[in-house]
Amino acid sequence: MTRFATRTVGLAAAALAVVDLAVWVFTGGGYFWPAWTWLGLALLFGGFVFVRSREARLAGRVTALTRSRRGAVDRQAAELKRVERDLHDGAQARLVSLSLTLGLAGGLIRLDPDGAAKLLDEARATAVAALDDLRAVMHSIHPAVLADRGLRDAVRTLALDLAVPVEVSGEVPDELPPAVETSAYFAIAECLANVVKHSAATAAAVTFEATTAALRITVRDDGHGGADLAAGTGLRGIADRLDAVDGTLHLHSPPGGPTVATISLPRSL
């Protein structure tokens, strides 16, 4: 029942109750209220309770969205600063060096061809390093393999470079929004990084499970456990990133292990 319909029924029930109350007073209390009057009062009370509970839920939802939006804006600003710093300290510095090296090589072409050739070799190596820096920055924004091959294959590619063997299983829907797909990828990447750095695990697994409304991802390892969402910035960062797309992170990591991180994401925004 919509809020409008609920209020309409409530107002009608209230009007009937007022009429019956007036008749009851006019007859000196000798008039007994029929059953439909009590039904109207019950509907009035029920409608009031329903509207109040719905308003409370909506207010809670608005609060949650406000918090997640603020977190998303803060993360975006921090991400822009990080990209700017990476470009300034990496690719930009190498390109400046490249320009100076090419200038020196140009001045030595006629006077010292061998020296110019060495400088050109250095310039070539600097250009390759600058391209690697740019690829690293782009990968941190949106991995190319994610756009080319999808989430599951991107995670498999990621797992190949880890020191701990990772089994990837399950199916991923093809129509995931880019924001959801990117959030899932980086959340899994952070979970697997924690497995390698902190868990002393010998094996890990990533399992995808899709329903009609959500994508559930389980990251499990056989390490010593003890992971805590309240400790460290990595897990909190995952939770904040997921919160921005209405996702959640649930962590179960008793002492002695195993650690199970469950990521839930909507299939549409």
Image (cartoon, rainbow, N blue to C red):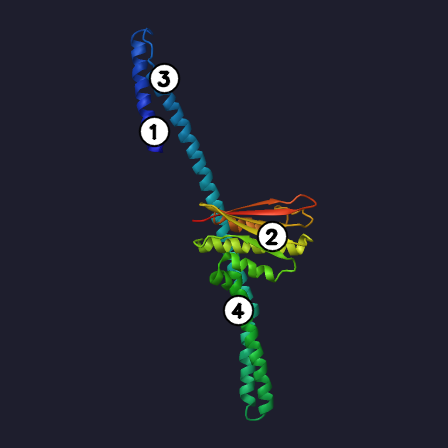
* View extreme (bottom): residue: 111
Q: Nearer the viewer, mark 1 or mark 2?
A: 2
Q: Secondary structure at mark 2?
A: strand
- Spatial CA span between label 4 and label 2: 31 Å
How packed mark 2 is, by other alpha carbons closer than 10 Å (few <14, some 14-19, many 20 or more), is some
Q: Which mark is residue 205?
A: 2
Disc 1 marks a residue whose amino acid type is: Arg
Instruction: Residue under label 3, please give it.
Output: 38
Say whether disc 4 or disc 1 marks the residue closer to the N-terminus: 1
Disc 4 marks a residue whose amino acid type is: Leu
Q: Secondary structure at mark 4?
A: helix
Q: Which mark is residue 134?
A: 4
Camera-side residue of 216 and 75: 216
Q: Position of residue 169 (x, y in %)?
A: 55, 53
Say whether disc 4 or disc 2 marks the residue closer to the N-terminus: 4
Note whether 50 is above or below 156 in the view shown.
above
- Locate residue 116 relative to residue 3 in the image: left or right: right
Query: Which quadrant is home to the N terminus?
Result: top left
Disc 2 marks a residue whose amino acid type is: Ala
- Spatial CA span between label 2 and label 3: 60 Å
Note whether 199 is above or below 45 in the view shown.
below
- Locate residue 15 relative to residue 157 in the image: left or right: left
Q: Which mark is residue 7?
A: 1
- Spatial CA span between label 4 and label 1: 59 Å
